Image (cartoon, grey):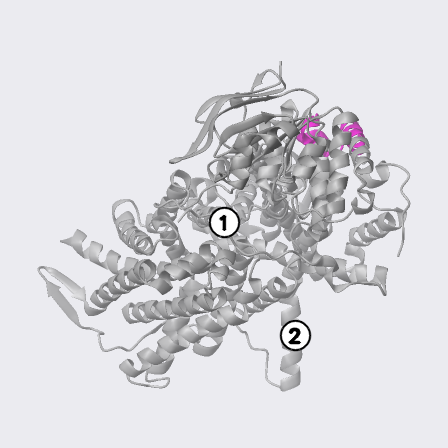
Amino acid sequence: MSLLEFENVTLKFGGLTAVNDLSFSVEEGEVFAIVGPNGAGKSTVFNLISRFYDPYAGQIRFDGHDLLQVKPSGVAAYGVARTFQNIELFEHATVLQNLLVGRHRHRRTNLLSEVFFTPSARRQELENREKVEEIIDFLDLQAYRDKMIAGLPYGVRKVVEVARALATDPKLLLLDEPASGLSVEETTDMRWWIDDIRRQMGITVLMVEHDMGLVSGVSDRVLAMADGAKLALGTPAQVQSHPAVVEAYLGKAS
Amino acid sequence: MDNAQLLISGLANGCVYGLIALGFVLIYKATEAVNFAQGDFMMLGAFVTIGLTNTEYMGLPFWLALPISLGIMGALGYLLDRLIIRRLFGESQTAVVILTIALGFVIRFVAGLIWGHEPQTLENPLAGKEVRFGGLVLGMEDVAVIVVTVLLTWGLYVFFSKTKLGLAMQGASQNQLAAYYMGIPVKRVQGFIWGLAGVVAGIAGILFAAKGSVDPTTGLLGIKAFAAAVIGGFGSLPGALAGGLIVGVIEPFASRYIAAGYSQIAPYALLLAVLIFRPHGLFSQVRVKKV
Amino acid sequence: MRIVFKTDYMQDIRPWKDGYQLSLYLILLAVVFAAPWWLDAFYLGELTNVLIWAIAGLGLMILTGHTGQASLGHAAFLAFGCYANVILIESGVPFLVAFPLAGILTGIAGVTVAIPALRLHGIYLAIFTLALSILMDDLIVLAEPITGGVAGKYMGGVEIFGHLVDRWGTPEQFYWLVLAVTVLVTLGYINLLRTPLGRSFIAVRDSEVSAQAMGIDIARTKTVSFALSCAVTGWAGALMGLYAGAFNNETFSVVISIQLLMMIVIGGLGSIHGAFLGAIVIGFLPQFLSIAKEYAGALFGGGTVAIPGLEFGIFGMILIGFILFEPMGIYGRWLKIRTWFELFPFYRKDMFKRQKSYLKTERLR
């Protein structure tokens, strides 16, 4: 059984079909990339998984659960974490606090035990700290641990968002354009991190990305989309040479 | 007949609410900010005109004082934007709300210092005249209020929905950056709108002071007008007038048919109901943020 | 600059940075506790008032400062707490039960308000709560059999273990009662901020979409925030009623709501310190103005003239100044000054710079 399954999913905004009869599946342990021109519906796929949109038709299953049955806030509980294209961090909190919010799905305490900071709340905080510090070490964020997000450079914010997603301890990590706006060096770093996330942590990665260098460097399989529909699916090399993909990117050869 | 009389006076009151609400909506439509001091602006407009016209102050002829005071109000609105609001460019809506509430306190204080705290009435050529219409007796002031309000709302509506400049202003509010790229002078448009809102507040103030008396706390009426703007659907000019009329009419009828205390309650109860069942007024304009 | 070497996670989890900071706060607490011995009765009363406002400020801070939901109607909850407390005591419930219960009831009232208000954002929520506050005023008048209407109610003192605590008769005891509540609420607040719930409030404030993606239920979080905020505000209201002695519908008018919001803005949104600093400004401004007027009267001759609305006028100007020049409030300014000294001479002007962005509407048309 695949980890994530899209089965004939269609999404319409008014008259516009954003996602058209899309089917694909992501296997456990792989890095799966979605590519396509602007407006192809890549981010919409992510927003469907996050349950921000209800599909018009079709099925989305994750790890055997019907995702369409849960609320947007319930998706994280199954072990799905994500980043956002335009960075949605908690601006007026520190990097550490941002990462600790990522631990929210593991909360075992209730209002009263937190207000009185009972031993169980203390134990939980210690556990959270341990987990979060691991991730800070992993992504080299030590220097920024106690800094406010509002003052951080763009490249660091991108990494913090990945770190926050990892803090949730996910099975599936959704990365929405992890390399957009990054310098060449930062993109290279991101590439090694994605590799490590999969190898060391055993987390499946689904990403949307424009940088073909990054995509062919890390991903096992690539889905090419245009106008909300599937163009091609296969290894990076297969997809890059697929005639329909070449046409979508470069226009029809005359 | 009694009910008709009640309705007319309610409509006249409602027009004043509508005029203040118009000021709220103007600013919201063009700059996405909410000016909680609009009611105090109206009070200020009334006092400026009283200061120019009434015999105990400068004693100017009414028709001369009228354009002068509207000019002053327009200038004040423009300066407010230029000196204060513009510095908040890019800050949250709530910051502007709190700022304008504070500004209301300051305006009330200054008006009290200059004109005192006694209620005053504007000396005007319409005072005391009446119009008989069937069995109804209408004060000339009430008629003037209704006529001026309807004309003004219509004029502004046409301006915003038909003229190029008006459409540009709407664009400026919906996406400032894009509007800026398209060559719309976003900041100048904002200044113009605040000036215009000042003039509208001035008109409301003059009509209000002609109908009844004003004192520095009159500006608190702005809260009720604000309720009217929300009931009508924040962001729609005819909606603002409609909301004002609803509030104006509901007040006297609530106190007559329920109990005296309810004229205070009715507008706000209606506001709560509208917010609960149609969260964004009668014409919904909000969607979820896109990521 | 003091550099703290951390060798243990608890060092970050506990509320104080190091022994030095802890001892500063303990000294402050001791000085404040000893206030009855170094302050005369008048100023002790004023200090009590400041603490009560600080509790109310903490209540609103939970909702507005940390969850990002602006409320212009918290006077309604002050009123609710005040009347609930007094009515319970009048019906024979001992104060030590009635007081906590009053807060809990106010919290429940807050939840019933929160549920319909959940869909409202930003300015609309502010309007909703503003209307609520105005309606509360009228509801108190209409519910005369319970509330005493315009004539109001009177509550002299309360009995704690057979001992009468009264604002006028035993001002010291009343002061300590208020101080105890202040300390308890503050400690609870500190704990909240270092555990998941408090962090989920901040998450909802800063980005609802990503809070959701982290598994935070927005509606539930907002509701809980409302409940806590209103409960604390209810306690402040109960104390306010005891402090005033006599109160009616006008004691908790909409102006108080507005004042409360402005207070925490001046103090500094999003910090516990902000509630206290704002309360100090609110509490001592009238005294400061009357002293200033006396001086001015002595300087320029002539008696002291009463200028109606002066307090609010000055208050408004202070607030405008803060929003324009120091949106982070007094506490934000203090942080900057402290950092300047700590880093001297390496402080840079842009260290606290905030991002400004062009505004994009969330409207469709």
Residue at position x 55%, y 41% in the image: B291
Q: Is residue C238 left or right of residue C271?
A: left
Image location of residue B87, percent across then percent down: 57, 66
Indicate the secondary structure of the residue bearing disc 1: helix
Would residue C202 be seen by someone viewing this image from the given angle?
yes
Q: Which residues are magenta?
A: A102-129
**Chain letter belonging to callout 1:** C
Report the front residue among A18 and A211.
Answer: A211
Q: Amino acid at mark 1?
A: Ala
Q: Residues within 10 Å of mark 2 (few under 14, many from 20)?
A: few
Where, quadrant-wise, is the N terminus of chain C in this rendering?
Answer: bottom right
Q: Quadrant of residue C142?
A: top left
| Disc ID at residue C126 | 1
Q: Is residue B197 left or right of residue C227?
A: left
| Disc ID at residue C194 | none
CA–CA distance in space, label 2 to label 1: 35 Å
Q: Which residue is mark 2?
A: C292
Dot in front, 2 or 1 = 1
Q: Amino acid at mark 2?
A: Ala
Image location of residue B157, percent across then percent down: 30, 59
Indicate the secondary structure of the residue bearing disc 2: helix
Image location of residue B79, percent across then percent down: 49, 73
Residue furthest to the left in view is: B134
| Marks 2 and 1, the one that precedes in the sequence | 1
